[in-house]
Image (tube, rainbow, N blue to C red):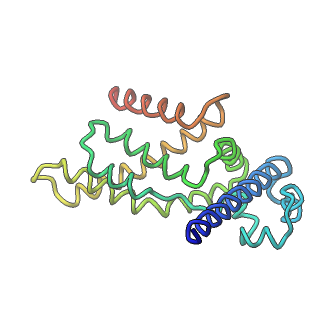
């Protein structure tokens, strides 16, 4: 069937695009870790990736985009709906999981993500750019937390208090994410699931002792 073949070809092109993007980003991050951000050029990334400059700029507008990733953090719509609707008792852990999922979006390769975290630690200017990308989801995250706690709040709770609590939780979780990233890159053999579980458990214990 013609339609089916077209779909298969499109899927093949998408797969090739993803594979090429991943190869370029791995090369870019690896080179920056080795030579420093200012010591890496687009030509070096192209040579390491086995592509032409034309191909590079078909995928990325700048060297920065290849290094920190072209896909900004985003909150999955289905996860957002599930978060609002759930009645789970562990709000903090669920918020943390939602933030982690948003940060991992567009990063299917855990080694690449770990290398990027190391790169951010070594290059403050890149960390600032990544934090700016993360800040774009803070408003959405705060709104999701507000909708969640509003469902569970009593009628005496003011709108202002609900908004303030949501904002406080949002910014607190971004701080916890920075702790989580530091632990991840400093712990041999750690992966995102292990680090998330450890951080969630430590967060619960810490809050209970305050």
Residue 166's place in the image compared with 111, above or below, is below
Residue 123's place in the image compared with 11, above or below, is above
- Across and down, in percent, residue 120 comes to 67, 50
Give me the residue at 74% from left, 72% from top.
58
- Across and down, in percent, residue 123 comes to 72, 52
Residue 171's place in the image compared with 181, above or below, is below
* Camera-side residue of 108 and 29: 108
Q: Is residue 130 left or right of residue 50?
A: left
Q: Residue furthest front?
A: 1
- Across and down, in percent, residue 62 comes to 74, 69
Give me the residue at 39% from left, 29% from top.
206
Give me the residue at 72% from left, 72% from top.
61
Q: Residue furthest left?
A: 155
* Camera-side residue of 180 and 128: 180
Which quadrant of the rendered structure holds the N terminus? bottom right
Instruction: Residue 200: name its quadrant.
Output: top left
- Across and down, in percent, residue 84 comes to 29, 52
Give me the residue at 61% from left, 31% from top.
190
Q: Is residue 208 left or right of residue 71?
A: left
Instruction: Residue 55: name its quadrant.
Output: bottom right
Q: Is residue 191 left or right of residue 54?
A: left
Instruction: Residue 208: name its quadrant.
Output: top left
* Camera-side residue of 174 and 95: 95
User: For the image shown, how many numbered marks are present on the structure?
Assistant: 0
């Amino acid at each position: 069937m013609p339609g089916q073949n077209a779909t298969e070809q499109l899927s093949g092109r998408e797969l090739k695009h993803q594979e090429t993007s991943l190869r370029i980003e791995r090369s870019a991050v690896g080179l920056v870790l080795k030579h420093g951000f200012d010591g890496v050029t687009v030509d070096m990334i192209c040579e390491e990736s086995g592509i032409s400059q034309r191909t590079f700029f078909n995928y990325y507008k700048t060297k920065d985009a290849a290094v920190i990733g072209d896909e900004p953090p985003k909150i999955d719509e289905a996860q957002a709906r599930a978060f609002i609707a759930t009645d789970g008792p562990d709000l903090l852990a669920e918020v943390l999981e939602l933030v982690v999922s948003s940060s991992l979006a567009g990063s299917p390769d855990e080694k690449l993500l770990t290398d990027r975290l190391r790169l951010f630690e070594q290059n403050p200017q890149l960390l600032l750019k990544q934090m700016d990308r993360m800040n774009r989801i803070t408003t959405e995250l705060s709104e999701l937390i507000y909708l969640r706690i509003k469902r569970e709040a009593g009628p005496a709770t003011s709108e202002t208090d609900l908004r303030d609590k949501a904002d406080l939780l949002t910014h607190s979780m971004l701080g916890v994410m920075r702790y989580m990233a530091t632990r991840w890159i400093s712990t041999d053999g750690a992966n995102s699931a292990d680090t998330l579980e450890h951080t969630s458990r430590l967060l619960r214990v810490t809050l209970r002792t305050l």
